[in-house]
Amino acid sequence: MGAHATLPFVLAVVLLGIGVYAIACKKNLIKMIVGVIVTEYAVNLFLVLLGYRSGGAAPILAEGQAPADLVQRAVDPLPQAMILTSIVIGLGVVALMVAMALRIHEKYGTFDLSLIRRLRG
Amino acid sequence: MVKLLPLFVAVPLGGAFLLPVLGRIRALRLLDAIAVLLALFGFAFSLALVVTGGGGTLWIGNWDPQRGATGINMVADGLARLLLLTVSLVALVAVLFSIRYMERFTGKGLYYSLFFLMLAGMNGVVLTGDLFNMYVFLEVAAIASYALVAFGCESEELEASFKYLVLGALGSTLALFGIGLCYNQSGTLNMAQMARFVESQGLNPVLLLAACMFFAGFGLKAAMVPFHAWLPDAHPSAPAPISAMLSGVLIKALGVYALCRVFFNVFGLAYDAFAGVLMVLGALSMVIGVFLAVGQWDFKRLLAYHSISQMGYVVLAVGLAGWLDRRGHHATAALALFGGLFHLFNHAAFKSLLFLCAGATEYATGTRQLKMLGGLVERMPVTSACCRVAALSISGVPPFNGFWSKLIIVLALAQAGRFWSGYYWLAGMTVLVSFLTLLSFVKVQRYALQGESKPPAAGAREVPVSMCLAMVILAVVCVGAGILCPLIQGDLLEPARDALFTGLRYANMVLGG
């Protein structure tokens, strides 16, 4: 594989690492939520880059065009459909997380995880 | 029968949107009745599927690969049938238990809505034959479960749910990353076609990275030991019927099932390392889980740690089966896998029952601290009897179901000792863990059921009939599956075992040819 083909993998793994770092090491609930968002977008970006083709056409079959010709020129539409789904799911998860963080703030008066410790390990 | 498979997802999903409306107009009796009917439908349907052995592949919208197009498919093989029956059984008793138990909470309609969303998601994960669909259903079930853990909206529940939410979202994201890597290599999302690709091309570094992602992602969902931190907080915080669902079936459908399906049927256990990782995860969970459980005084928290430990048994047995199968010791491998799947079913029965008993004690006394309970055996005879049955099952006392499945796993390990002596040690460890389990449940019996009644337990009365009925059903299953094991062996467990063992032949079954 050339540098061109490995770039999405490197990018995705680096971004994923940043997100996991934020989830594991940050003590602030909001920063942890941002970490989760970063991991989700690392994967979304990875998926869309998989289908990318430099100079590719939109994957719509024009009238009179042979399907084989379209396959030759168009970008891969399946990852695009996948990330649409995963973005919507991600939105749901983030909305739930933010709602939960707000309720926690109501109860404890803080977003600092080191002060929110009622449960024992 | 195959044409009706989408109903497993569609019926609970429809119910999930109908029930909050009934809750809003305060038709509470109707609400309960419809919820029970929906759960009963799922149970009857899955039972019929198991008894008739009906199975096969349904291509949604007839987008069949033999007609030149690959669509989304649903596959009901032996393993899917076993999981479906387990999920629907626990769902049915959880709904029965919820009728009275959830009266203490507001928003029963919303509760049922989340419950059936979770059920639809689990059925979908088990039935789908497409990796991306599996991710979507997994998220449906997981998001519903995050909300259910926080259903009481108390400080501890919110905290536990947030922890679960962050780790669960990370697990799903890692699994999706793995799915993307697989798609990149094989150009398909269909599990059967991907299996064909792996068979012909072998594994490459990208697919190995995907395998790591699946181990981490599904391992997080299954709460295997390095990834278990969220479970002891999340499972006790949920309302009791939901704890029963989470510990009884959710970690199996989303975690263990997904691991088995991907590594056995898609990757075909192409490396020893896969079976090895499964065994290490299983053994670690089994031992560490039980040691953490012994010191607990919160009834439900103790049960949650035991869930980690008992799922360790299942994953250890499954990994062992893979290791032996690759070396050609098929008979012993079949025994190990049989034990693992039997224990999976048994764990669903006795752990759900234990969580329901803990819920009943909490309902009657208002506490679940073992030191504050006592003397329940006279005040709550049904709950106590059921609790005893479940405790004996989980500790592996004959003739209850847990004994047989643990015995089979230990036997398989001992037989495997002929090929590598380390397995004798593992077999010994399995017995030791079983003994520690017994020890910690003796503690439960001693403090909660025997002795003098302390203030919170002094005024306790037996819980309402519907809650008792739910517990008695599971207790009967615990005894029945132990004594009548040969009966369920042929219809339920052996097809499930064979479905995993066919390995890459799964692809032939789905795609034909």
Image (tube, coloured by chain):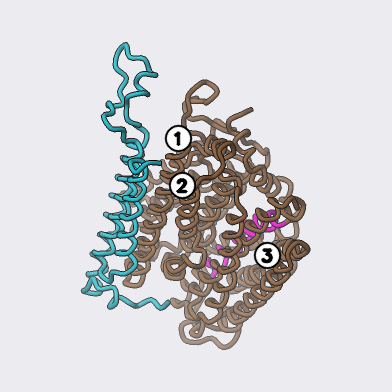
Chain colours: A cyan, B brown
Amino acid identity at mark 3: Gly
Q: Mark 3 lies on which chain?
A: B
Q: Mark 2 lies on which chain?
A: B
Identify the mark nearer the N-term, 1 or 3: 1
Name the magenta segment's main secondary structure: helix
Q: Where is residue A60 in the image (x, y as percent from the top left)?
A: 30, 23
Q: Distance between the residues labelled 2 and 3?
A: 40 Å
Amino acid identity at mark 1: Gly
Residue annotated with mark 3: B402
Residue annotated with mark 2: B206
Residue annotated with mark 1: B187
Identify the mark nearer the N-term, 2 or 3: 2
Q: Which chain carries label 1?
A: B
Do discs 1 and 3 belong to a common subunit? yes
Do discs 2 and 3 belong to a common subunit? yes
Question: Magenta segment range?
Answer: B336-357
Total number of numbered discs in the rendering:
3
Is B343 colored magenta in this rendering?
yes
Amino acid identity at mark 2: Val
Q: Where is residue B201 in the image (x, y as percent from the top left)?
A: 55, 38
Residue plotted at (53% across, 63% down): B467
Q: Is residue B100 left or right of residue A103?
A: right
